[in-house]
Image (spheres, grey):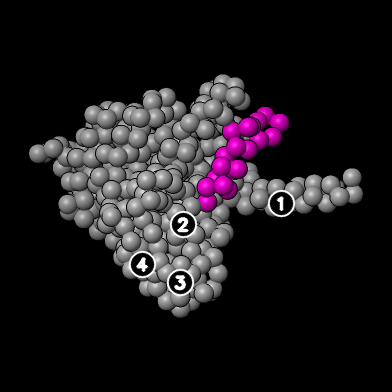
Amino acid sequence: MKRILPAIVSTVLTFQAMAQQPLAQGKEKWLGSIHSSSQIQDFEKYWNQVTPENAGKWGSVESTRDVYNWTALDAAYDFAKENGFPFRYHVLLWGNQQPSWIESLEPDEQLEEIEEWMDTLAARYPDIDYLEVINEPLHDPPSGAGNGNYLAALGGWGSGYDWIVNGFKMARERFPDVPLVINDYNILNNTSDANRYATIVNLLKSEGLIDVIGVQGHAFTTTTSNETMKEVLGILAATELPIMVTELDIDGPSDQKQLEDYQRIFPLLWEHPSVIGITLWGFRQGLWRNEQKAYLIDTDGSERPALTWLREYVEETFVSLTLDEKLKQELSIYPNPAQSYFTIQSEEAIKQVKIYDLVGKTVHQSSSQQVELPGHIPAGTYVVAITTISGRQISQRLKIN
């Protein structure tokens, strides 16, 4: 017993220490959640990226014309900055939760109000990390009563998607250094909509107006097959833009069902080379799909099995890469150990090389097959994560002398 007890104590202390920091702390990708009154307790013990749930929606901030309520949005923004977490603003323009007073204005006056809305946000929140410009352009555009009714003020449909392009142009003018994001639902489960979505993305990309693709991951989309979701991610990745999964929730009618679905869905999204992060749409009771029991913390405050598994999974897959056994035979790194450089010998061109230390921190990255090592990297053992031009991935150990 005396020999076993220290090991037990050590394990408990290690688990407690892990529980005090975000699951994706020190990882290449962030794993976040929404900020709201029902979700803030112990947020920083689990998640390291912040998105306001409703606080940033125009109808929440300016429900009365020229009267702004910043309280909840300030709280989310300040919380992210105080903890050093990336902050994604949700959302500038949408066909839902918009001010009712704007619907009856003439298009010219509506455009003035839209510009004022963007100007005010740009002045108040200068350090946004990601800006969601338009939410649900395919499924909920700002057209008609109850939906903002200002699509015409942005230029209408025009030759296809003029209102979307104009909305992004306005955002780029006011937020020139902030990565701009588009977001929509029923993309992961629908290859037809995914192709329409990619058409919009490529249009925006051709004008230098978009930086990141957002895809919502609500439970009613991820009930599709993994094969469909893989195909959709491939369609979006072909745009050569990074992807973020913006609104992930997985229902939990029972602990076992939720666990099985997390084990099926989450690795597919997390390990995709184009996915830079995932945002859960809540983890405590009071979240959007509360009736469907999508929460990860139970009524007594205990973690449901899916959350326990999620912690272990993210910890074990710290570089978030899938090993390609065939690529392993085709690719080699030399010299290893390395000193000032190393070369990747590969039959396929290399798209990206990242070097991580053993706690998952990125210490250097390159797009060349001959990688020059900066002098600030100390001697030691590292992980080299390699992505080929076709998206295949491998990670290998590298010793630097």
User: Which residue was labeled with disc 2?
Assistant: 396
The residue stretch that appears in magenta: 298-318
Q: Residue at x 47, y 48 (%)?
A: 320
Q: Is residue 71 visible?
A: no
- Mark 4 surroundings within 10 Å by alpha-carbon count, few (fewer than 14), some (14 through 19), many (20 or more): some
Amino acid beneath label 1: Thr
Name the image quarter holding the N terminus: top right
Q: Nearer the viewer, residue 365 or 140?
A: 365
Which residue, given by chain and number where applicable, does mark 4 sit on?
343
**Amino acid bearing label 3:** Ala
Look at 56% across and 60% down and name the residue there: 358
Q: Determine the secondary structure under disc 2.
A: strand
Q: Is 41 one of the magenta-colored residues?
A: no
Q: Label 4 sits on what residue type?
A: Thr
Q: Position of residue 364 (x, y in %)?
A: 43, 67
Q: Amino acid at mark 2?
A: Gln
User: On the image, numbered disc 1 is attached to which residue?
Assistant: 14
* Residue bearing mark 3: 338
- Whether 377 is drawn above or below 48: the answer is below
